[in-house]
Image (cartoon, grey):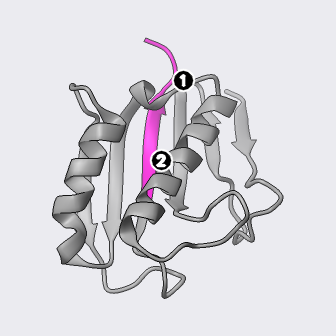
């Protein structure tokens, strides 16, 4: 079964990883932070969440998919106080129901101290 890798865009200073890897009909999307198109991590949870969704949509689009193809989402937050806002924005971005299966974890830190959220996901590209 061929494996296809999706590289980070050139403006993103990324660690050694693929933004996504496709194996068969499954697309595994690496943890996506809230950097904007210029590679800047904005202050504020709302802005970072919005950028994460844009970045995930870009990766999905390269694979010929959309948010509706997501089957599993893992959300990493650095502040418990952002859970309610994340749920509200998540419903708007990933809805309408049915939503993908999801796990939400609050972690002590993410790779950049300014990162407030990171989302990784799995998409089913057929069916």
Residue at x 70%, y 36% (from the top left corner): 3
Comparing 94 with 104, the one in front is: 94
Secondary structure category for the residue under label 2: helix
The x, y position of residue 103, in whole percent, is 24, 54
**Which residue is labeled 2 in the image?**
53
Secondary structure predominantly adopted by residues drawn in magenta: strand
Please tell me in which quadrant of the rendered image residue 86 appears. bottom left
Residue 37, relative to residue 110: is it above or below?
A: above
Residue at x 62%, y 35% (from the top left corner): 22
Please state if 119 lies on the left or on the right of 90 as rendered. right
**Which label belongs to residue 25?**
1
Quadrant into which the N terminus falls: top right
The x, y position of residue 24, in whole percent, is 59, 25
Residue at x 58%, y 34% (from the top left corner): 60
Please tell me in which quadrant of the rendered image residue 17 appears. bottom right
Please say whether residue 120 is one of the residues in the magenta stretch.
Answer: yes
Please state if 100 lies on the left or on the right of 26 as rendered. left
Q: Residues within 10 Å of mark 2 (few under 14, many from 20)?
A: many
Q: Using the numbered discs, state the Cα–Cα distance from disc 2 to disc 1 in whole angstroms.
A: 21 Å
**Which label belongs to residue 87?**
none
Residue 6, relative to residue 75: is it above or below?
A: above
Residue at x 52%, y 22% (from the top left corner): 125
Please state if 13 lies on the left or on the right of 119 as rendered. right
Quadrant into which the C terminus falls: top left
Question: Which contiguous range is marked in magenta?
Answer: 119-127
Q: Residues within 10 Å of mark 1 (few under 14, many from 20)?
A: few
> Going from the N terminus, do you reach mark 2 or mark 1 first?
1
């Amino acid at each position: 079964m061929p494996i296809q890798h999706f590289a980070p865009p050139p403006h993103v200073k990324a660690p050694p990883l693929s933004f996504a890897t496709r194996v068969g009909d499954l697309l595994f999307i690496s943890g996506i932070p809230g950097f904007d198109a210029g590679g800047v991590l904005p202050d504020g949870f709302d802005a970072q969440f919005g950028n994460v969704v844009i970045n995930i949509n870009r990766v999905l689009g390269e694979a010929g998919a959309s948010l509706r193809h997501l089957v599993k989402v893992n959300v990493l937050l650095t502040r418990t106080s952002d859970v309610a806002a994340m749920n509200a924005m998540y419903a708007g971005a990933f809805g309408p129901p049915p939503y993908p299966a999801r796990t939400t974890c609050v972690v002590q830190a993410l790779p950049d101290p300014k990162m407030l959220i990171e989302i990784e996901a799995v998409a089913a590209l057929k069916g």
